[in-house]
Amino acid sequence: MIRISKKGNNICEVEYLGRRKKNNFRKIILVSIFLIFIWIFGFYLYATYQNIEIDESNYTAERQQSTISEQTVESKEENSTKVADILEETTEKVVGISKLKNTGSSIFSNSGENDLGLGTGFIITSDGYIVSNSHVTGEKYSKCYITLENGTNYEGTVAWSDTDLDLSIVKIDAKNLPYVSLGDSSSVRVGETVYAIGNPIGFEFRRTVTSGIISAKNRTIKIDEENKSSYMTDLIQTDATINPGNSGGPLIYPNGDVIGINTVKISTAEGIGFAIPVNIIKPIIESFKETGTFEEASIGIYAYDKEVIPYLDSTYNLINFDTGIYVAQITKNGPADNTELKEGDIITSIDGKELNTMNDLREYIYTKKPNEEVTLQITRKKIKKEIRIILGKK
């Protein structure tokens, strides 16, 4: 069918009506199909949603996440309580030590450290062996006075003392005492939390606990007193407050293990204190536990490790070595005298154990007995040698 319309100026428009109707019908069909598809898809989603089972574990998981956070807070609180319990228990194993006998019921009197020379120690066996500093207890066989946490007083005898190490072991006549556990000072790491326990000043501040971290390891310090210089090596540095009365007290981990014996502080600075690594005295403690005695062997030398060299006079300035200890002096008529060992040698190992500090050597020698043989590996002007020495008695 054709429709003709006049547009003016003798122009006519011709339209084919049949094709137009056909196009309209096709559009209607396509729209209908699209609407049917939308309806079917919507019905499918509705039916699927109706059949979904809600997994309540999803909600439970959210609650569990919240519970974990609560448990973390509780864990921190429990850990803090546990540390407090351990510290409280450890203080029962810490004692007061004085060189002067107090006429009162306890050396923890108002007289304080100036009158009584008050220091600290800690119990290492149930039958009354106590570790402290030699400058607190005095030399071997001397007497000192011990006060336990419960106020009981004892007269103690120094069973062993080493002024170079500033360590001593005292024996009191007591039984069934609580005693500390010893840790491994060779594994300490800078930044670890530690606590110092001691008796600064006197009665008012007995068994004071201070906290800090391990600030450094293997420190060497020079001590000048009575117109004489000495060196303490391989020390643990800590910023846990150490005051004069803390000397001889334990430096412990949060689990209660003793890793050091508090000894000195830098008086011209804050937060710089030192402790002697506990491993150095372990062999001696074991000997007293097993036999009640300790027979100290000696190699008969005086040596420096590389950390001490910078403190020495100009004659040692050219000495340079990476490992080992430098033999500065051989004791006359001692075990090393009249052997191949010479002054100036570098001892790199003993019986295969590598040496880097004098404490390494001491720690090993303390495990030996007089008349036993040891083998030294030494370096002399780039020449390596092996030397055997029979240990003597110190």
Image (spheres, rainbow, N blue to C red):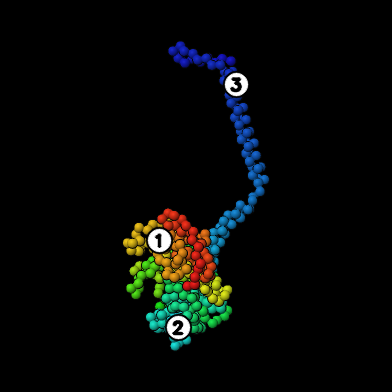
- Which mark is first along the chain, 3 or 1? 3
Badge 3 crowding class, 10 Å Cα cut-off, few under 14, some 14 to 19, many 20 or more, is few
Name of the residue lying farthest toward the top: 10
Above or below 336: residue 33: above
Q: Where, quadrant-wise, is the N terminus in this rendering?
A: top right
Q: How far apart are marks 2 and 3 (CA)?
A: 119 Å
Above or below 283: residue 67: above
Disc 1: which residue: 344
Disc 3: which residue: 22
Residue 120 image-quadrant placement = bottom left
Q: Can residue 204 be seen in this view?
A: no
Q: How far apart are marks 1 and 3 (CA)?
A: 116 Å
Q: How far from the left and from the top, in percent, is residue 50?
A: 66, 45
Badge 2 crowding class, 10 Å Cα cut-off, few under 14, some 14 to 19, many 20 or more, is many
Disc 2: which residue: 107
- Viewer-proximal residue among 227 and 170: 227
| Picture residue at 42% right of the left edge, 54% below the top | 382
Q: How far from the left and from the top, in percent, is residue 342?
A: 42, 62
| Picture residue at 35% right of the left edge, 61% below the top | 316
* Residues at marks 1 and 3 touching, judged by CB atoms closer than 8 Å: no
- Which mark is first along the chain, 1 or 2? 2
As helix, strand or loop, the secondary structure at mark 1 comes to loop
- Viewer-proximal residue among 17 and 82: 82
- Please, what is the three-letter code of the amino acid marked with disc 2? Ile
Residue 321 image-quadrant placement = bottom left
Name of the residue lying farthest toward the front: 338
As helix, strand or loop, the secondary structure at mark 3 comes to helix
Q: How far from the left and from the top, in percent, is residue 325?
A: 43, 61
- Please, what is the three-letter code of the amino acid marked with disc 1? Gly
Q: Which mark is residue 232?
A: none
- Please, what is the three-letter code of the amino acid marked with disc 3? Lys
| Picture residue at 33% right of the left edge, 62% below the top | 315
